[in-house]
Amino acid sequence: MSEIAVSRIFEATPERIWKAWTTPEQLHKFFASAGSHVPLETVTMDIRVGGAFALEMRNDENGDVYPMHAEYTELERPRRLGFRTSGRIDGLIELEDLGSGKTLLTWTTMTDFGGDDGYRRDAITGTHSAVDNLGELLDSLGEV
């Protein structure tokens, strides 16, 4: 198994970031890598351990569709959100309240890349891109 971990400090409370991860109207705005988007109508969520979320990422250039389906494995509002995709990728979002309206987000991904460096590179790029998009979304919404 290989691990990818991305950490960022956001000017937002853990609750605010949790809401972005658990609201289809917000998740679709950031959960896509550069050059793609997630149409709101493709996002479904059943937010409970054992529940699932699904979405479709669409390539902006050629329209290719990349479906994603995951099961929630851990929910500890507003600190930890774990999931496992149908492609056997384990994700864990950890939110640490730093006070003064700041939160440290750490997104850890575990999977077996099977020696495929391109797959690993794409996963790293996609994770960083989604975290960057999340920061932009939080900045645009302000503290709610």
Image (tube, grey):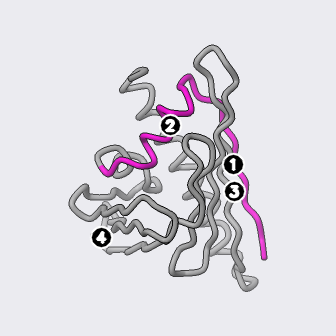
Q: Quadrant of residue 123?
A: bottom right
Query: Mark 3 vs mark 2: which is more N-terminal?
Result: 2
Tag 4 secondary structure: loop
Q: Which label number is shown at residue 62? A: 4
Give me the residue at 32% from left, 58% from top.
Answer: 38
Cα distance between the residues tagged 4 and 3 = 29 Å
Pointer 3 and pointer 2: residues touching (CB < 8 Å)?
no
Q: Disc 2 vs disc 4: which is toward the camera?
A: 2
Q: To which residue does mark 3 refer?
A: 108
Give me the residue at 38% from left, 49% from top.
Answer: 27
Cα distance between the residues tagged 2 and 4 = 31 Å
Give me the residue at 57% from left, 71% from top.
Answer: 84
Query: Mark 1 vs mark 3: which is more N-terminal?
Result: 1
Q: Residue furthest bottom?
A: 114
Check the image and report above or below for 144 versus 111.
Answer: above
Return the residue nearer the eye: 108 or 47: 47
Query: Mark 4 vs mark 3: which is more N-terminal?
Result: 4
Tag 2 secondary structure: helix
Q: Disc 3 vs disc 2: which is toward the camera?
A: 2
Circle 4 packing at 10 Å, graded few (<14), some (14-19), many (20+), is few
Magenta-span inclusion, residue 22:
yes
Amino acid at pointer 4: Asn
Quadrant of the snapshot with the C terminus: top left
Expressed as whole percent of the image width and height from the top left, the position of residue 26 reads 35, 44
Cα distance between the residues tagged 1 and 3 = 7 Å
Cα distance between the residues tagged 1 and 4 = 28 Å
Q: Disc 2 vs disc 1: which is toward the camera?
A: 2
Q: Which label number is shown at residue 17? A: 2
